[in-house]
Image (tube, rainbow, N blue to C red):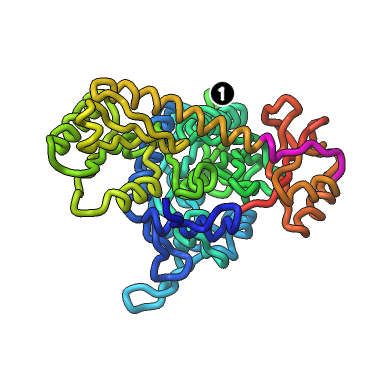
Amino acid sequence: MARVLTPRAEDFPRWYQDLIAKAQLADNGPVRGTMVIRPAGYSIWERMQAEMDARIKIAGAENAYFPLFIPESYLKREADHVEGFSPELAVVTHGGGKQLAEPVVVRPTSETVIGEFMAKWVDSYRDLPLLLNQWANVVRWELRPRVFLRTSEFLWQEGHTAHATEEDARNYARKILHEVYEDFMVGVLGIPVVVGRKTNRERFAGATSTYTLEGMMGDGKALQMGTSHELGQNFAKAFDITYSAASGGVEHAWTTSWGTSTRMLGGLIMSHGDDNGLRVPPRLAPIQAYVMVVKDGDGVAAAATKLRDALRDAGVRVGLDDRVDTAFGRRAVDAELKGYPVRIEVGPRDLAAGNAVVVRRFDGSKTAVPVADVVGRVLAALDEDQQKLYDEALAFRQSHTVEVSTLADAIAATATGWARVPWSAVGVDGEAEANGQGVTVRCLVRADGSVPDSQDEPDLVAILGRSY
């Protein structure tokens, strides 16, 4: 294949930008820091939405929608929250040709406006838990934008819940963390994630605990793929979210919030992409199998259509490319760039022998397969390559993660990947020192890999890395 992308090993950031452009995933928007998601990219996001939304609903949350504009005064009611977001806020001061009596903020997240309505909707312990989610856009003014990874406007889901007890809130925040986010990222995205606790320095503004899922990208850097937060009673007290308890008293609720965004598209590209383009895991792919007419004539188009229909009947998401007026080589390159997991190439010569050629995007292998066996071979390839993509990403992370015992060694190791180091060897002062060198504590985990309840637990392991 002719070289279309800058090789990853030569210039990883340039490769990333090349791939987004050449695979027609997105463009930069007309306002700096914004993006236009093209159909090829948006179809992947739609699949992410569908998979995530199903899991969120199984977890009991219901979808709702809240306003884009939030009164500035709402944010000021939770001091840590507004302080944490202040540099990123976009504020509207004029509307309808007049100066507004009160400036309104374009939502950076919706804890405050949802808190206002939770207070209105919750009266009794019978109203709890209140489990809400919304699919929306948010705005966080970004100084150093990068498509999908950091943009001033992005798409996401944000969950917000209210509970009668701290234990119930904590259990739900972790339920989302594991049963929704981790299950989706591992099982569908094929990305191995380290699930842990953010340090107090890194936790969400206004939260009491922040849990994170960290993925290693193809250059060894970390990407925060999603977060789930316990908010304690901070927002409940700021917005007077109270309920009549079964005992007869009036109590403040305990709340959570949690979110994932189009940043996952960037993670998908950087985790699985190669020098030929995107590789989309089969369970996620909008088009899992792509039937291509190599050259028309001798019943090729009819055979390709029949294969398309047979694959569709077998439950495969399938596309058909019969654009014989465009050179086949160009179409094949385009299919590689877009990362379709399997291609089925149908041409006169192979068809005369009763075959079609099955091409697997994972490793580029090409196999002549009897037409009658194509559906079975494709189904097997989709299952196998989903697992192979995950296994490859996991092996990469393991080979680029080192165990060290000192902060200095940990910082040095982040030049090529991640470091695992005793949290006791880092501590609050060491974390500040690492931050000064562009290194962050991505999360804390217990020795057995589970998520700690506090950063003060003994024998915790810190994961250090450079990040996007």
Asked which secondary structure carries label 1, the reply is: loop
Residue positioned 86% across, 38% down in the render? 405
Residue with the mark numbered 1: 247
Q: Position of residue 13 (x, y in %)?
A: 56, 58
Residue positioned 44% across, 46% down in the render? 278
The residue under label 1 is which amino acid type? Ser
Q: Position of residue 253 (x, y in %)?
A: 55, 36
Q: Position of residue 324 (x, y in %)?
A: 19, 49
Looking at the picture, tell me which residue is in the foreground, 251 or 353. Answer: 353
Q: Which residues are magenta?
A: 398-406
Q: Is residue 176 visible?
A: no
Residue positioned 59% across, 59% down in the render? 11
Looking at the picture, tell me which residue is in the foreground, 39 or 458. Answer: 39
Q: Position of residue 358 (x, y in %)?
A: 34, 32
Q: Any magenta on residue 173?
A: no
Instruction: Describe residue 27's horizontal placement relative to residue 458 as left or right.
Output: left
Mark 1 closeness class: few <14, some 14–19, many ≥20 residues within 10 Å: few
